[in-house]
Image: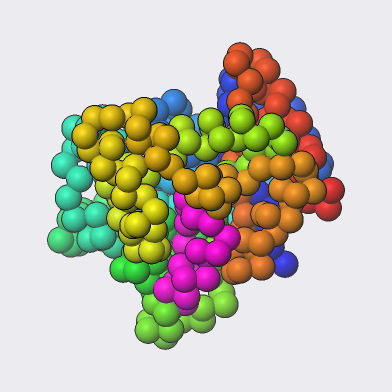
Amino acid sequence: MARWGFTFPFDGLPLAQHREALQEAERLGYTDAWSYEIDGVDCFTPLALASAWTERLFLGTAIANVYTRAPLALAISANGVAEAAPGRFALGIGAGSSVIVERWGGVPFELPYRRVRDTNRMLRAMLSGEKVTETLETARSDGFRLSRKLAPTPPIYIAALRQRMLRLAGAESEGAIINWLSAADVPRCIEEVRAGARQAGRDPDALAAVCRIFVCVTEQEAVVDAVGRRMIAAYLNVPVYAAFHEWLGRSQMLQPMWDAWAAGDRKGATAAIPSRLIEDLLISGDAETCRKKVQAYVDNGVTVPVVNFIAFAPTPEARTQQTLEMMRVLAPGG
């Protein structure tokens, strides 16, 4: 049976005001709350607050970036949340994108597969509580040991887009985190994860498949079209996501957008996005329709659907209310 999660912090709602929303989500039957970080707040602080405000929600990072924090920093942050929420925390790690890492952060976005692989291996050693002296291709530690080991070691999930990273998640982690894909794309990704597990002699059925799913509960087609075009243009022109959708077979569909974007024609690029792609990547409609579309991801192999509520109101306060209403109408069991 699939767990049923959501992405937070919620749009427009300050962290200090999340207590009631998280407790309501728990009462409504949500099982998971997954944080994120792009350009607002870090991914660990929301989970630390949620650990104190909730009793059952499983908490995860989707994702903590392996470039913007060294393995040591990731290990002690993860150890802190694991201690605050023993047995109900997973550390999701990933490479992110060149925009976040290199353009914004000033860190070269190099060797992402190897960086994730080595960080995962280093973190496993560090979080075990053992003394770590190891030199890997992209990570090294000489004598680090956690001084506090008061909680179970958290599982590590790897965010993955294409074959090598998906297989790495299957071979060396407790689960894969996938993102920006349609329900019909899920089986291909899941099969790569399972192939990696089989090659490593592991049980594919024991792995989690976490998927962030963008949902906008509205029947206003013009709103969905505008929101979808803005989101797709912002993400699928980023090299890692462009390569992902090439791998998924969407080159012909997306080439006009990519060409316009490369020429500096942002308006033309947005206009070139096919409507059917918006329908594939952004779930919309009434609550029952949205629920069925989320279920399609589960039917295709996702074990933890993580709904990312997309609000569109003009003010933070109104977006918060939209988000909370979406949370309520999409709650597990209706």
Magenta residue check for 324? no
Residue at 70 percent of width and 27 percent of height: 322
Using the image, determine if residue 190 lies above or below residue 64. Answer: below
Residue furthest to the right in view is 334
Using the image, determine if residue 297 lies above or below residue 6. Answer: below
Q: What is the magenta range?
A: 175-194
Which of 57/283 is in front?
283
Relative to 322, 117 lies left or right:
left
x%, y% of residue 210?
Answer: 55, 57
x%, y% of residue 159?
Answer: 41, 55
Q: Report if residue 248 is visible in the image.
A: yes
Residue at 40 percent of width and 34 percent of height: 270
x%, y% of residue 149?
Answer: 46, 52
Relative to 222, 194 lies left or right:
left
Residue at 74 percent of width and 56 percent of height: 292
Magenta residue check for 192? yes
Relative to 256, 219 lies left or right:
right
Q: Report if residue 172 is visible in the image.
A: no
Which of 75/242 is in front?
242
Residue at 68 percent of width and 55 percent of height: 293
Provide the major secondary structure of the magenta segment: helix
Which of 246/77 is in front?
246
